[in-house]
Amino acid sequence: MARELRSSRRNFLVGLGGFAAAAKLMPGSALAFEAGACPPPSAWSDLARAVKGGVLRPEDPFFADICRPNNLRYGATLPAGIARCASAGDVQACIAWVKRQAMPFAVRSGGHNYAGFSTTPGLLIDMSRMAGVTPVAGSDGLVTVQGGTLNLLAYKQMERMGRTITHGRCDTVGAAGFLLGGGIGFNMRKFGVGADLMRATELVTADGHLVRADAGTDASLYWACRGGGGGNFGINTAFTLETRPVDAVTVFNLTWTRDLPKVLKLLLTELASAPDDFGSKIAVTIPSRQEGCDRAPLTLSILGQLHGSDTSLKDIFKSTWELRDQDQSQIKADVPYWQGQDFLTETTFPYYYQEKSSYMRAASIDDEAIAAMFDWAGRMPATSMPVSFKFFQVGGAIDRVGRTETAYVHRGADWLFTVEANWWSPTDSTLQVTQALDWQQRFTDDVNSRTGAVGAFQNFSDPSLADWQGAYYGENLARLAEVKRAVDPGMLFTFAQAIRPAETPARRSPSSALPGGARREAEAVERLP
């Protein structure tokens, strides 16, 4: 079971909200109730009458199960109540209520926010009852995805339609946060990131209105919702997505147990030229403390799929194909698309973790960088859970969209690099966790320096990231701040890494005028061949 955790985490949405004007909450500050922010019983009764989906309080059955986040690192923060929204009208009622009560709030469907931004001591706005995927009448392949839909339901309903999108693997992740932060998956090199397929969205904004944003109406808000991250601009209640017909795929999980540095270097170099029909994720897994005591080795594996193509897997893998461990490798050739996704899908359970990420080019990964990765792997202060450093293959169709065409700025790389820290409490002590997080930070910093890796994936929100604004949004940050000022100038929607509203009218700035991480990513992309 523990080994299933090594690649578990796709972010769900959303935002941690607070009534900034009354509660005076700013990004990064500790949430606290002020006088007047502890509603009397009559206020809770008012909310229960207004929210047709119902309101739960701590004394109600299953309260703890519903409010438990996927990252148990943030599980100690319990809400004062849970509003189980069943419609956009329920969401509007919640926004009106938290403003009257000066009550902090968070929005959640899947609860997979890596940094705990879907937890709150105030009102938890639970979107899980707003779920479903329906065809748009009279359209050619458009669907409406409700804002509380989990991946598992989306998969089942699109399978019935014979359609697909770019989607993740974890079946309990919410579609909203996945899409709002960009959305990565094995289809992204063929179709683009999930946000590239978004054609419209509906959301409740800070003024309580339900608005529709698309290319022709509220175009700037539509642009911001395609990669600007969940919880920044409102509560998204529905998405219109362009789907694609399914076809047969070959799915695989290949393993190497020898010459791992050599194999990793070859994979990172040679797979960068694979056709857009090919999607993959490489993982080097470091054993847990007990596995290490049992002398379990590091393993290197690659999971992925190939849509129908004239190029075979053997041709794509080139010099690593014959080096794989054939006894531990699995290949299912030319299976129906959704049957292939059953092979690839992972189901996870809550545990404790942090993930750090960056984007790199294959041409910048030399032998010394590979050696450093394995050196750091050997120095991992082991916890009771295995960890991995991973490479999600990007490029392809992602790069056919410009860096500023949507809010998702991370175009032009070959690999999304991540390093995990996983643990279990109370099995792992505070000292062991601190050492693991320090190792994770130094590993990431060293590899980023050696490879010129830049940026960070906003769906893998990292609470320890210093320049998160530039790392997540690059040169798009200024325009996102303008959108924030237009729709939420008082920062009703706020959390530790919330986008701040622009203070003055902003103009498109050259890379030299951008904040640190944004400038570094922009300059790095400008230098790319």
Image (cartoon, rainbow, N blue to C red):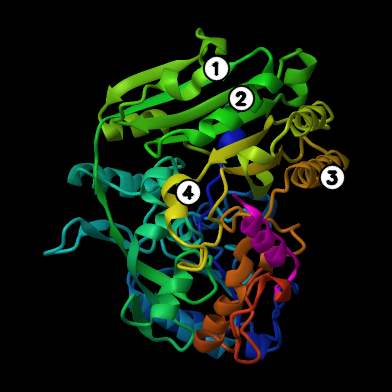
Residue position for label 4: 184
Mark 4: secondary structure = loop
Please name whichever residue, 439 or 23, is drawn nearer the observer in this view of the structure.
439
Which label is found at residue 319? Answer: 1
Give the class, few, some or many, for how many residues have Cα within 10 Å of label 1's Cα (few <14, many ≥20): few
Q: Of label 3 and label 1, which has the lower sequence position?
A: 1
* Residue range of the region highlighted in magenta in the rendering: 514-529
Instruction: Kindly indicate the quadrant of the structure image that contains residue 465.
Output: bottom right
Which label is found at residue 438? Answer: 3
Q: Does the residue at mark 3 contact the one at mark 4 (Cβ under 8 Å)?
A: no
Residue type (three-letter) at the residue carrying disc 3:
Asp
Residue position for label 2: 266
Q: Of label 2 and label 4, which has the lower sequence position?
A: 4
Residue type (three-letter) at the residue carrying disc 2:
Leu
Q: Does the residue at mark 1 contact the one at mark 2 (Cβ under 8 Å)?
A: yes
Residue type (three-letter) at the residue carrying disc 4:
Ile
Foreground disc of the pair 2, 3: 2
- Is residue 8 positioned above or below 406 on the image? above
Give the class, few, some or many, for how many residues have Cα within 10 Å of label 4's Cα (few <14, many ≥20): many
Q: CA distance from mark 2 to mark 4?
A: 23 Å
Q: CA distance from mark 3 to mark 1?
A: 36 Å
Residue type (three-letter) at the residue carrying disc 1:
Ser
